[in-house]
Amino acid sequence: MFEAIHGSAPDIAGKGIANPSGLLHGAILMLEHIGQADVGVRLTNAWLRTIEDGVLTGDVYREGHD
């Protein structure tokens, strides 16, 4: 019920290029479902802060590809 639809992506395993956003979002939805919305909010805020701080995955930004 709460999973990323793209699966485990074994073709990119170990390459350091995976984007965990789908898994994080699934976890946030699960937390809300089980009555832990406050934990989901904290996870969401940490996720957004990471993006705001410029920590991005290769599918979102690559140096020199502005």
Image (tube, rainbow, N blue to C red):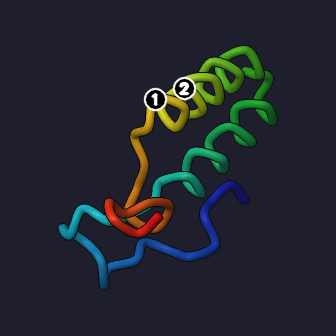
Image coordinates of residue 1 in percent, x first then y, are: 73, 59
Residue 64 x/y as whole percent: 33, 65
Disc on res. 49: 2
Q: Looking at the rendered structure, which numbered label has been put on residue 4? A: none
Is 5 positioned to the left or the right of 1 in the image?
Answer: left
Quarter of the view holding residue 8: bottom left
Q: Residue furthest bottom?
A: 11
Q: Which numbered dot is residue 53?
A: 1
Location of residue 63 in the rendering, given as x and y in whole percent from the top left corner? 32, 60
User: Measuring 20% from the left and 70% from the top, which residue is drawn there?
Assistant: 15
Q: Amino acid at mark 2?
A: Arg
Give me the residue at 46% from left, 68% from top.
59
Q: Is residue 10 left or right of residue 30?
A: left
Q: Nearer the viewer, residue 10 or 12?
A: 12
When the figure is inspected, residue 10 is found, relative to residue 60, above or below; the finding is: below
Mark 1 vs 2: CB contact within 8 A? yes
